[in-house]
Image (tube, grey):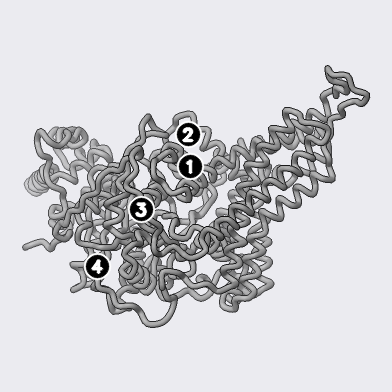
Amino acid sequence: MTQPRFLPAEAPLAMPVQSLHQAPPHSGRPTTAPRGLFLRRLFVIGGAVIMTAGGGAEMYRVFNGNGPSVLGILILVLFVVLFAWIALSFMSAVGGFCASLAGGGLGLGIAKTGPLPALRDRTALLMPTYNEEPARVMAGLKAIHGSLTATGQSEHFDIFILSDTTDPDVWIAEEAAFLAFRAEIGPAAPRLFYRRRARNTDRKAGNIAEWVRRFGGAYPQMLTLDADSLMEGETVLRMAAAMEAHPGVGLIQTLPVIAGGTSLFARMQQFAGRVYGPVIAQGIAWWHGSEGNYWGHNAVIRTQAFAEQAGLPHLKGRKPFGGAILSHDFVEAALMRRGGWAIHMVPALGGSYEESPPSLTDVAIRDRRWAQGNLQHAGVLPTRGLHWVSRLHLLMGIGSYITSPLWLCFLLVGVLVSLQSRFVQPQYFGATKSLFPRWPQVDPVLAKWVFIGTMAVLLAPKLFAYILLLVNGPMRRGSGGALRALLSLLLETLIGGLVAPVAMLIQTEGVMQILAGRDSGWNAQRRDSDAAPLRLVWRQYWRFMAFGIGLAVIAYAVSPALFLWMTPVLVGLVLAVPLVMLTASSGVGLALQRMGLLSIPEERQPNAILRSAAGLRAAEAPSVPGASMQGAIRHLLGDAALLAAHRAMLPPARRPGQDPIDVPLLVGLTKIAEADTLQKAIDQLSKQETAAVLGSADGLDRLQELATAFAVLSLGDG
């Protein structure tokens, strides 16, 4: 029987590795850049500078009213850096608030409603996956495929599952789920493809780049997805049409809405993302203009632009700073813009979704990898020819992780200032002659007002978001009404404020590990909301509780006033373990859902694609056979059709003298040769060796021979 093609004919597209030391020829301003962009940027950045200067002057008066001191200057420097960060976010939110009230368009001529545009080009939907639950991935893809089919223009789209999976159980389950998906969609099956890489060179960026070099020539556009991505067919269609209409645009990024969370933590994330996110994203799009950013998924990319400009080099030095660039998306956007291509964000388009990690622990695992990737951007900042806004993106990526250690330093220096005032004998007269003593001074009244002002700047974007919610009827009703939305905002702010100190210490610990040379590795993300047992949470978070208790004792020893001043931070740290357990609980999250709190429109009235994905995920049981390698081998050998398809999907055999020697394969073949039963071979193979053997025609032959010999021997004995 002839096997169907599981990949299209190759259409190679050159994707050269870019130099960070030599800039391409200078390109002019993109034709899609909005008018008045200079004034918008002057408003946001100039406003942030003025606010920071004013806040810094007041902070100087708080701690250095009678002349500068070492600790006073140190705390001033930390304050200025941190206040500049939140001032820029505040001014960006002001721009987003004003743009939202003005009802500005989506940009690039994209219409959110109305007749669908007719497409002329082909777009590839790329789903990179790495050890993800196959049934879950396929459920999302089926929902996207169904939504595209409903547009009547699905023939313009091909779907590629690009597997970097290393777990043999997951790999074989992926293939089985893929074949079932192809059989289900029937005549449209030739537009669904699967490819697995035997070697995960350069991780996700390398996965996409390999596809571009093999198949990119056949597709003017590609849409990148994550394993938890969902996108409505109409949204994809409108973005693809906008790309066709604007040949100078290299990338269009949507604002993915978090949906589908059940734990308290996930529902807080999705409420914050849905209510505050549009204000922040609208502000970013408003002043970034054609120098936008890329978030790695739920974006349409011009394949030619990506191939020409986004081939990532390896950074010099050892890991964690050297090697493959982990946070590749920011860098790819910066290089594409350097090459003259416009990068746009369309946050108001809608129809773009993702999921949230279910707990603080899961966010911490993901953030550890992101922190390493963003800190690597320090090696990309000097790249020649980058647009200054692209450099700002890279700086903000670095700052998103550096600010946690800086906040901790700011907190500890504040305690030191109080300790000095409480226990160190003041030196009233210096070396110079003076009629008046130099009294050490901290102005408590002014400090209170600086604190209030800082908190107002920090929380103002939430107020902007709530005002916009009140004037947006569907959004207000979808959030449970004005009162429930307000209660949800207060609840999210309170719990988020308690969790923030714990998150600060987690990020600080991660940054310190990276600076000490520890690589983050690459692990699959947990997406289910099963709460971790108390024993595990205690082992992970007891040290944060201990730190909080120690800090509380010191603060109270200095003065009860300092203790009360630090209470918001201390409470969160001391309650770290119960907070993590509480926020990871689906029971608490669902109870609040029944009360109408932390609700979003997509939860109260889910649209067709969200309902479809939820139904498909609920209907399909987990597809991974089991935790042991018995699942992969026995599953494959016990299904003749799956085995035949698996053989047809194998990569070409190793070319002697050209390709590196596959040591796990050689070891695996040796173990199989020395085993006298299939079970012994299975027991002796490691996961890496099992994957290597299952990826080799020779290995499959030997496993089949062993299984057949054992079956014949058993029949003879019988």
Disc 2 is placed on an element classified as: helix
- The amino acid sitting under disc 1 is Ala
Mark 4–mark 1 distance (CA, rounded to whole Å)? 36 Å
Classify residue 685 as left or right of residue 229.
left
Q: Which residue is mark 1?
A: 371
Disc 4 is placed on an element classified as: loop
Q: Earlier in the sequence, mark 4 or mark 1?
A: 4
Disc 3 is placed on an element classified as: loop
Q: Residue at x 28, y 40 (%)?
A: 687
Q: Which residue is mark 3?
A: 27
Q: Earlier in the sequence, mark 1 or mark 2?
A: 1
Tell me the number on the disc at residue 334: none
Q: Which residue is mark 2?
A: 514
- Label 2 near label 1: C-beta < 8 Å? yes
Single out the mark in the foreground, 2 or 4.
Answer: 4
Q: Which residue is mark 4?
A: 122
- The amino acid sitting under disc 4 is Arg
Q: Earlier in the sequence, mark 2 or mark 4?
A: 4
Q: Residue furthest bottom?
A: 115
Q: Is 420 above or below relative to 88?
A: above
Mark 1–mark 2 distance (CA, rounded to whole Å)? 8 Å
- Label 3 near label 4: C-beta < 8 Å? no
- The amino acid sitting under disc 2 is Ile
Q: Residue at x 59, y 54 (%)?
A: 89
Q: Residue at x 9, y 47 (%)?
A: 708
Q: Earlier in the sequence, mark 3 or mark 1?
A: 3
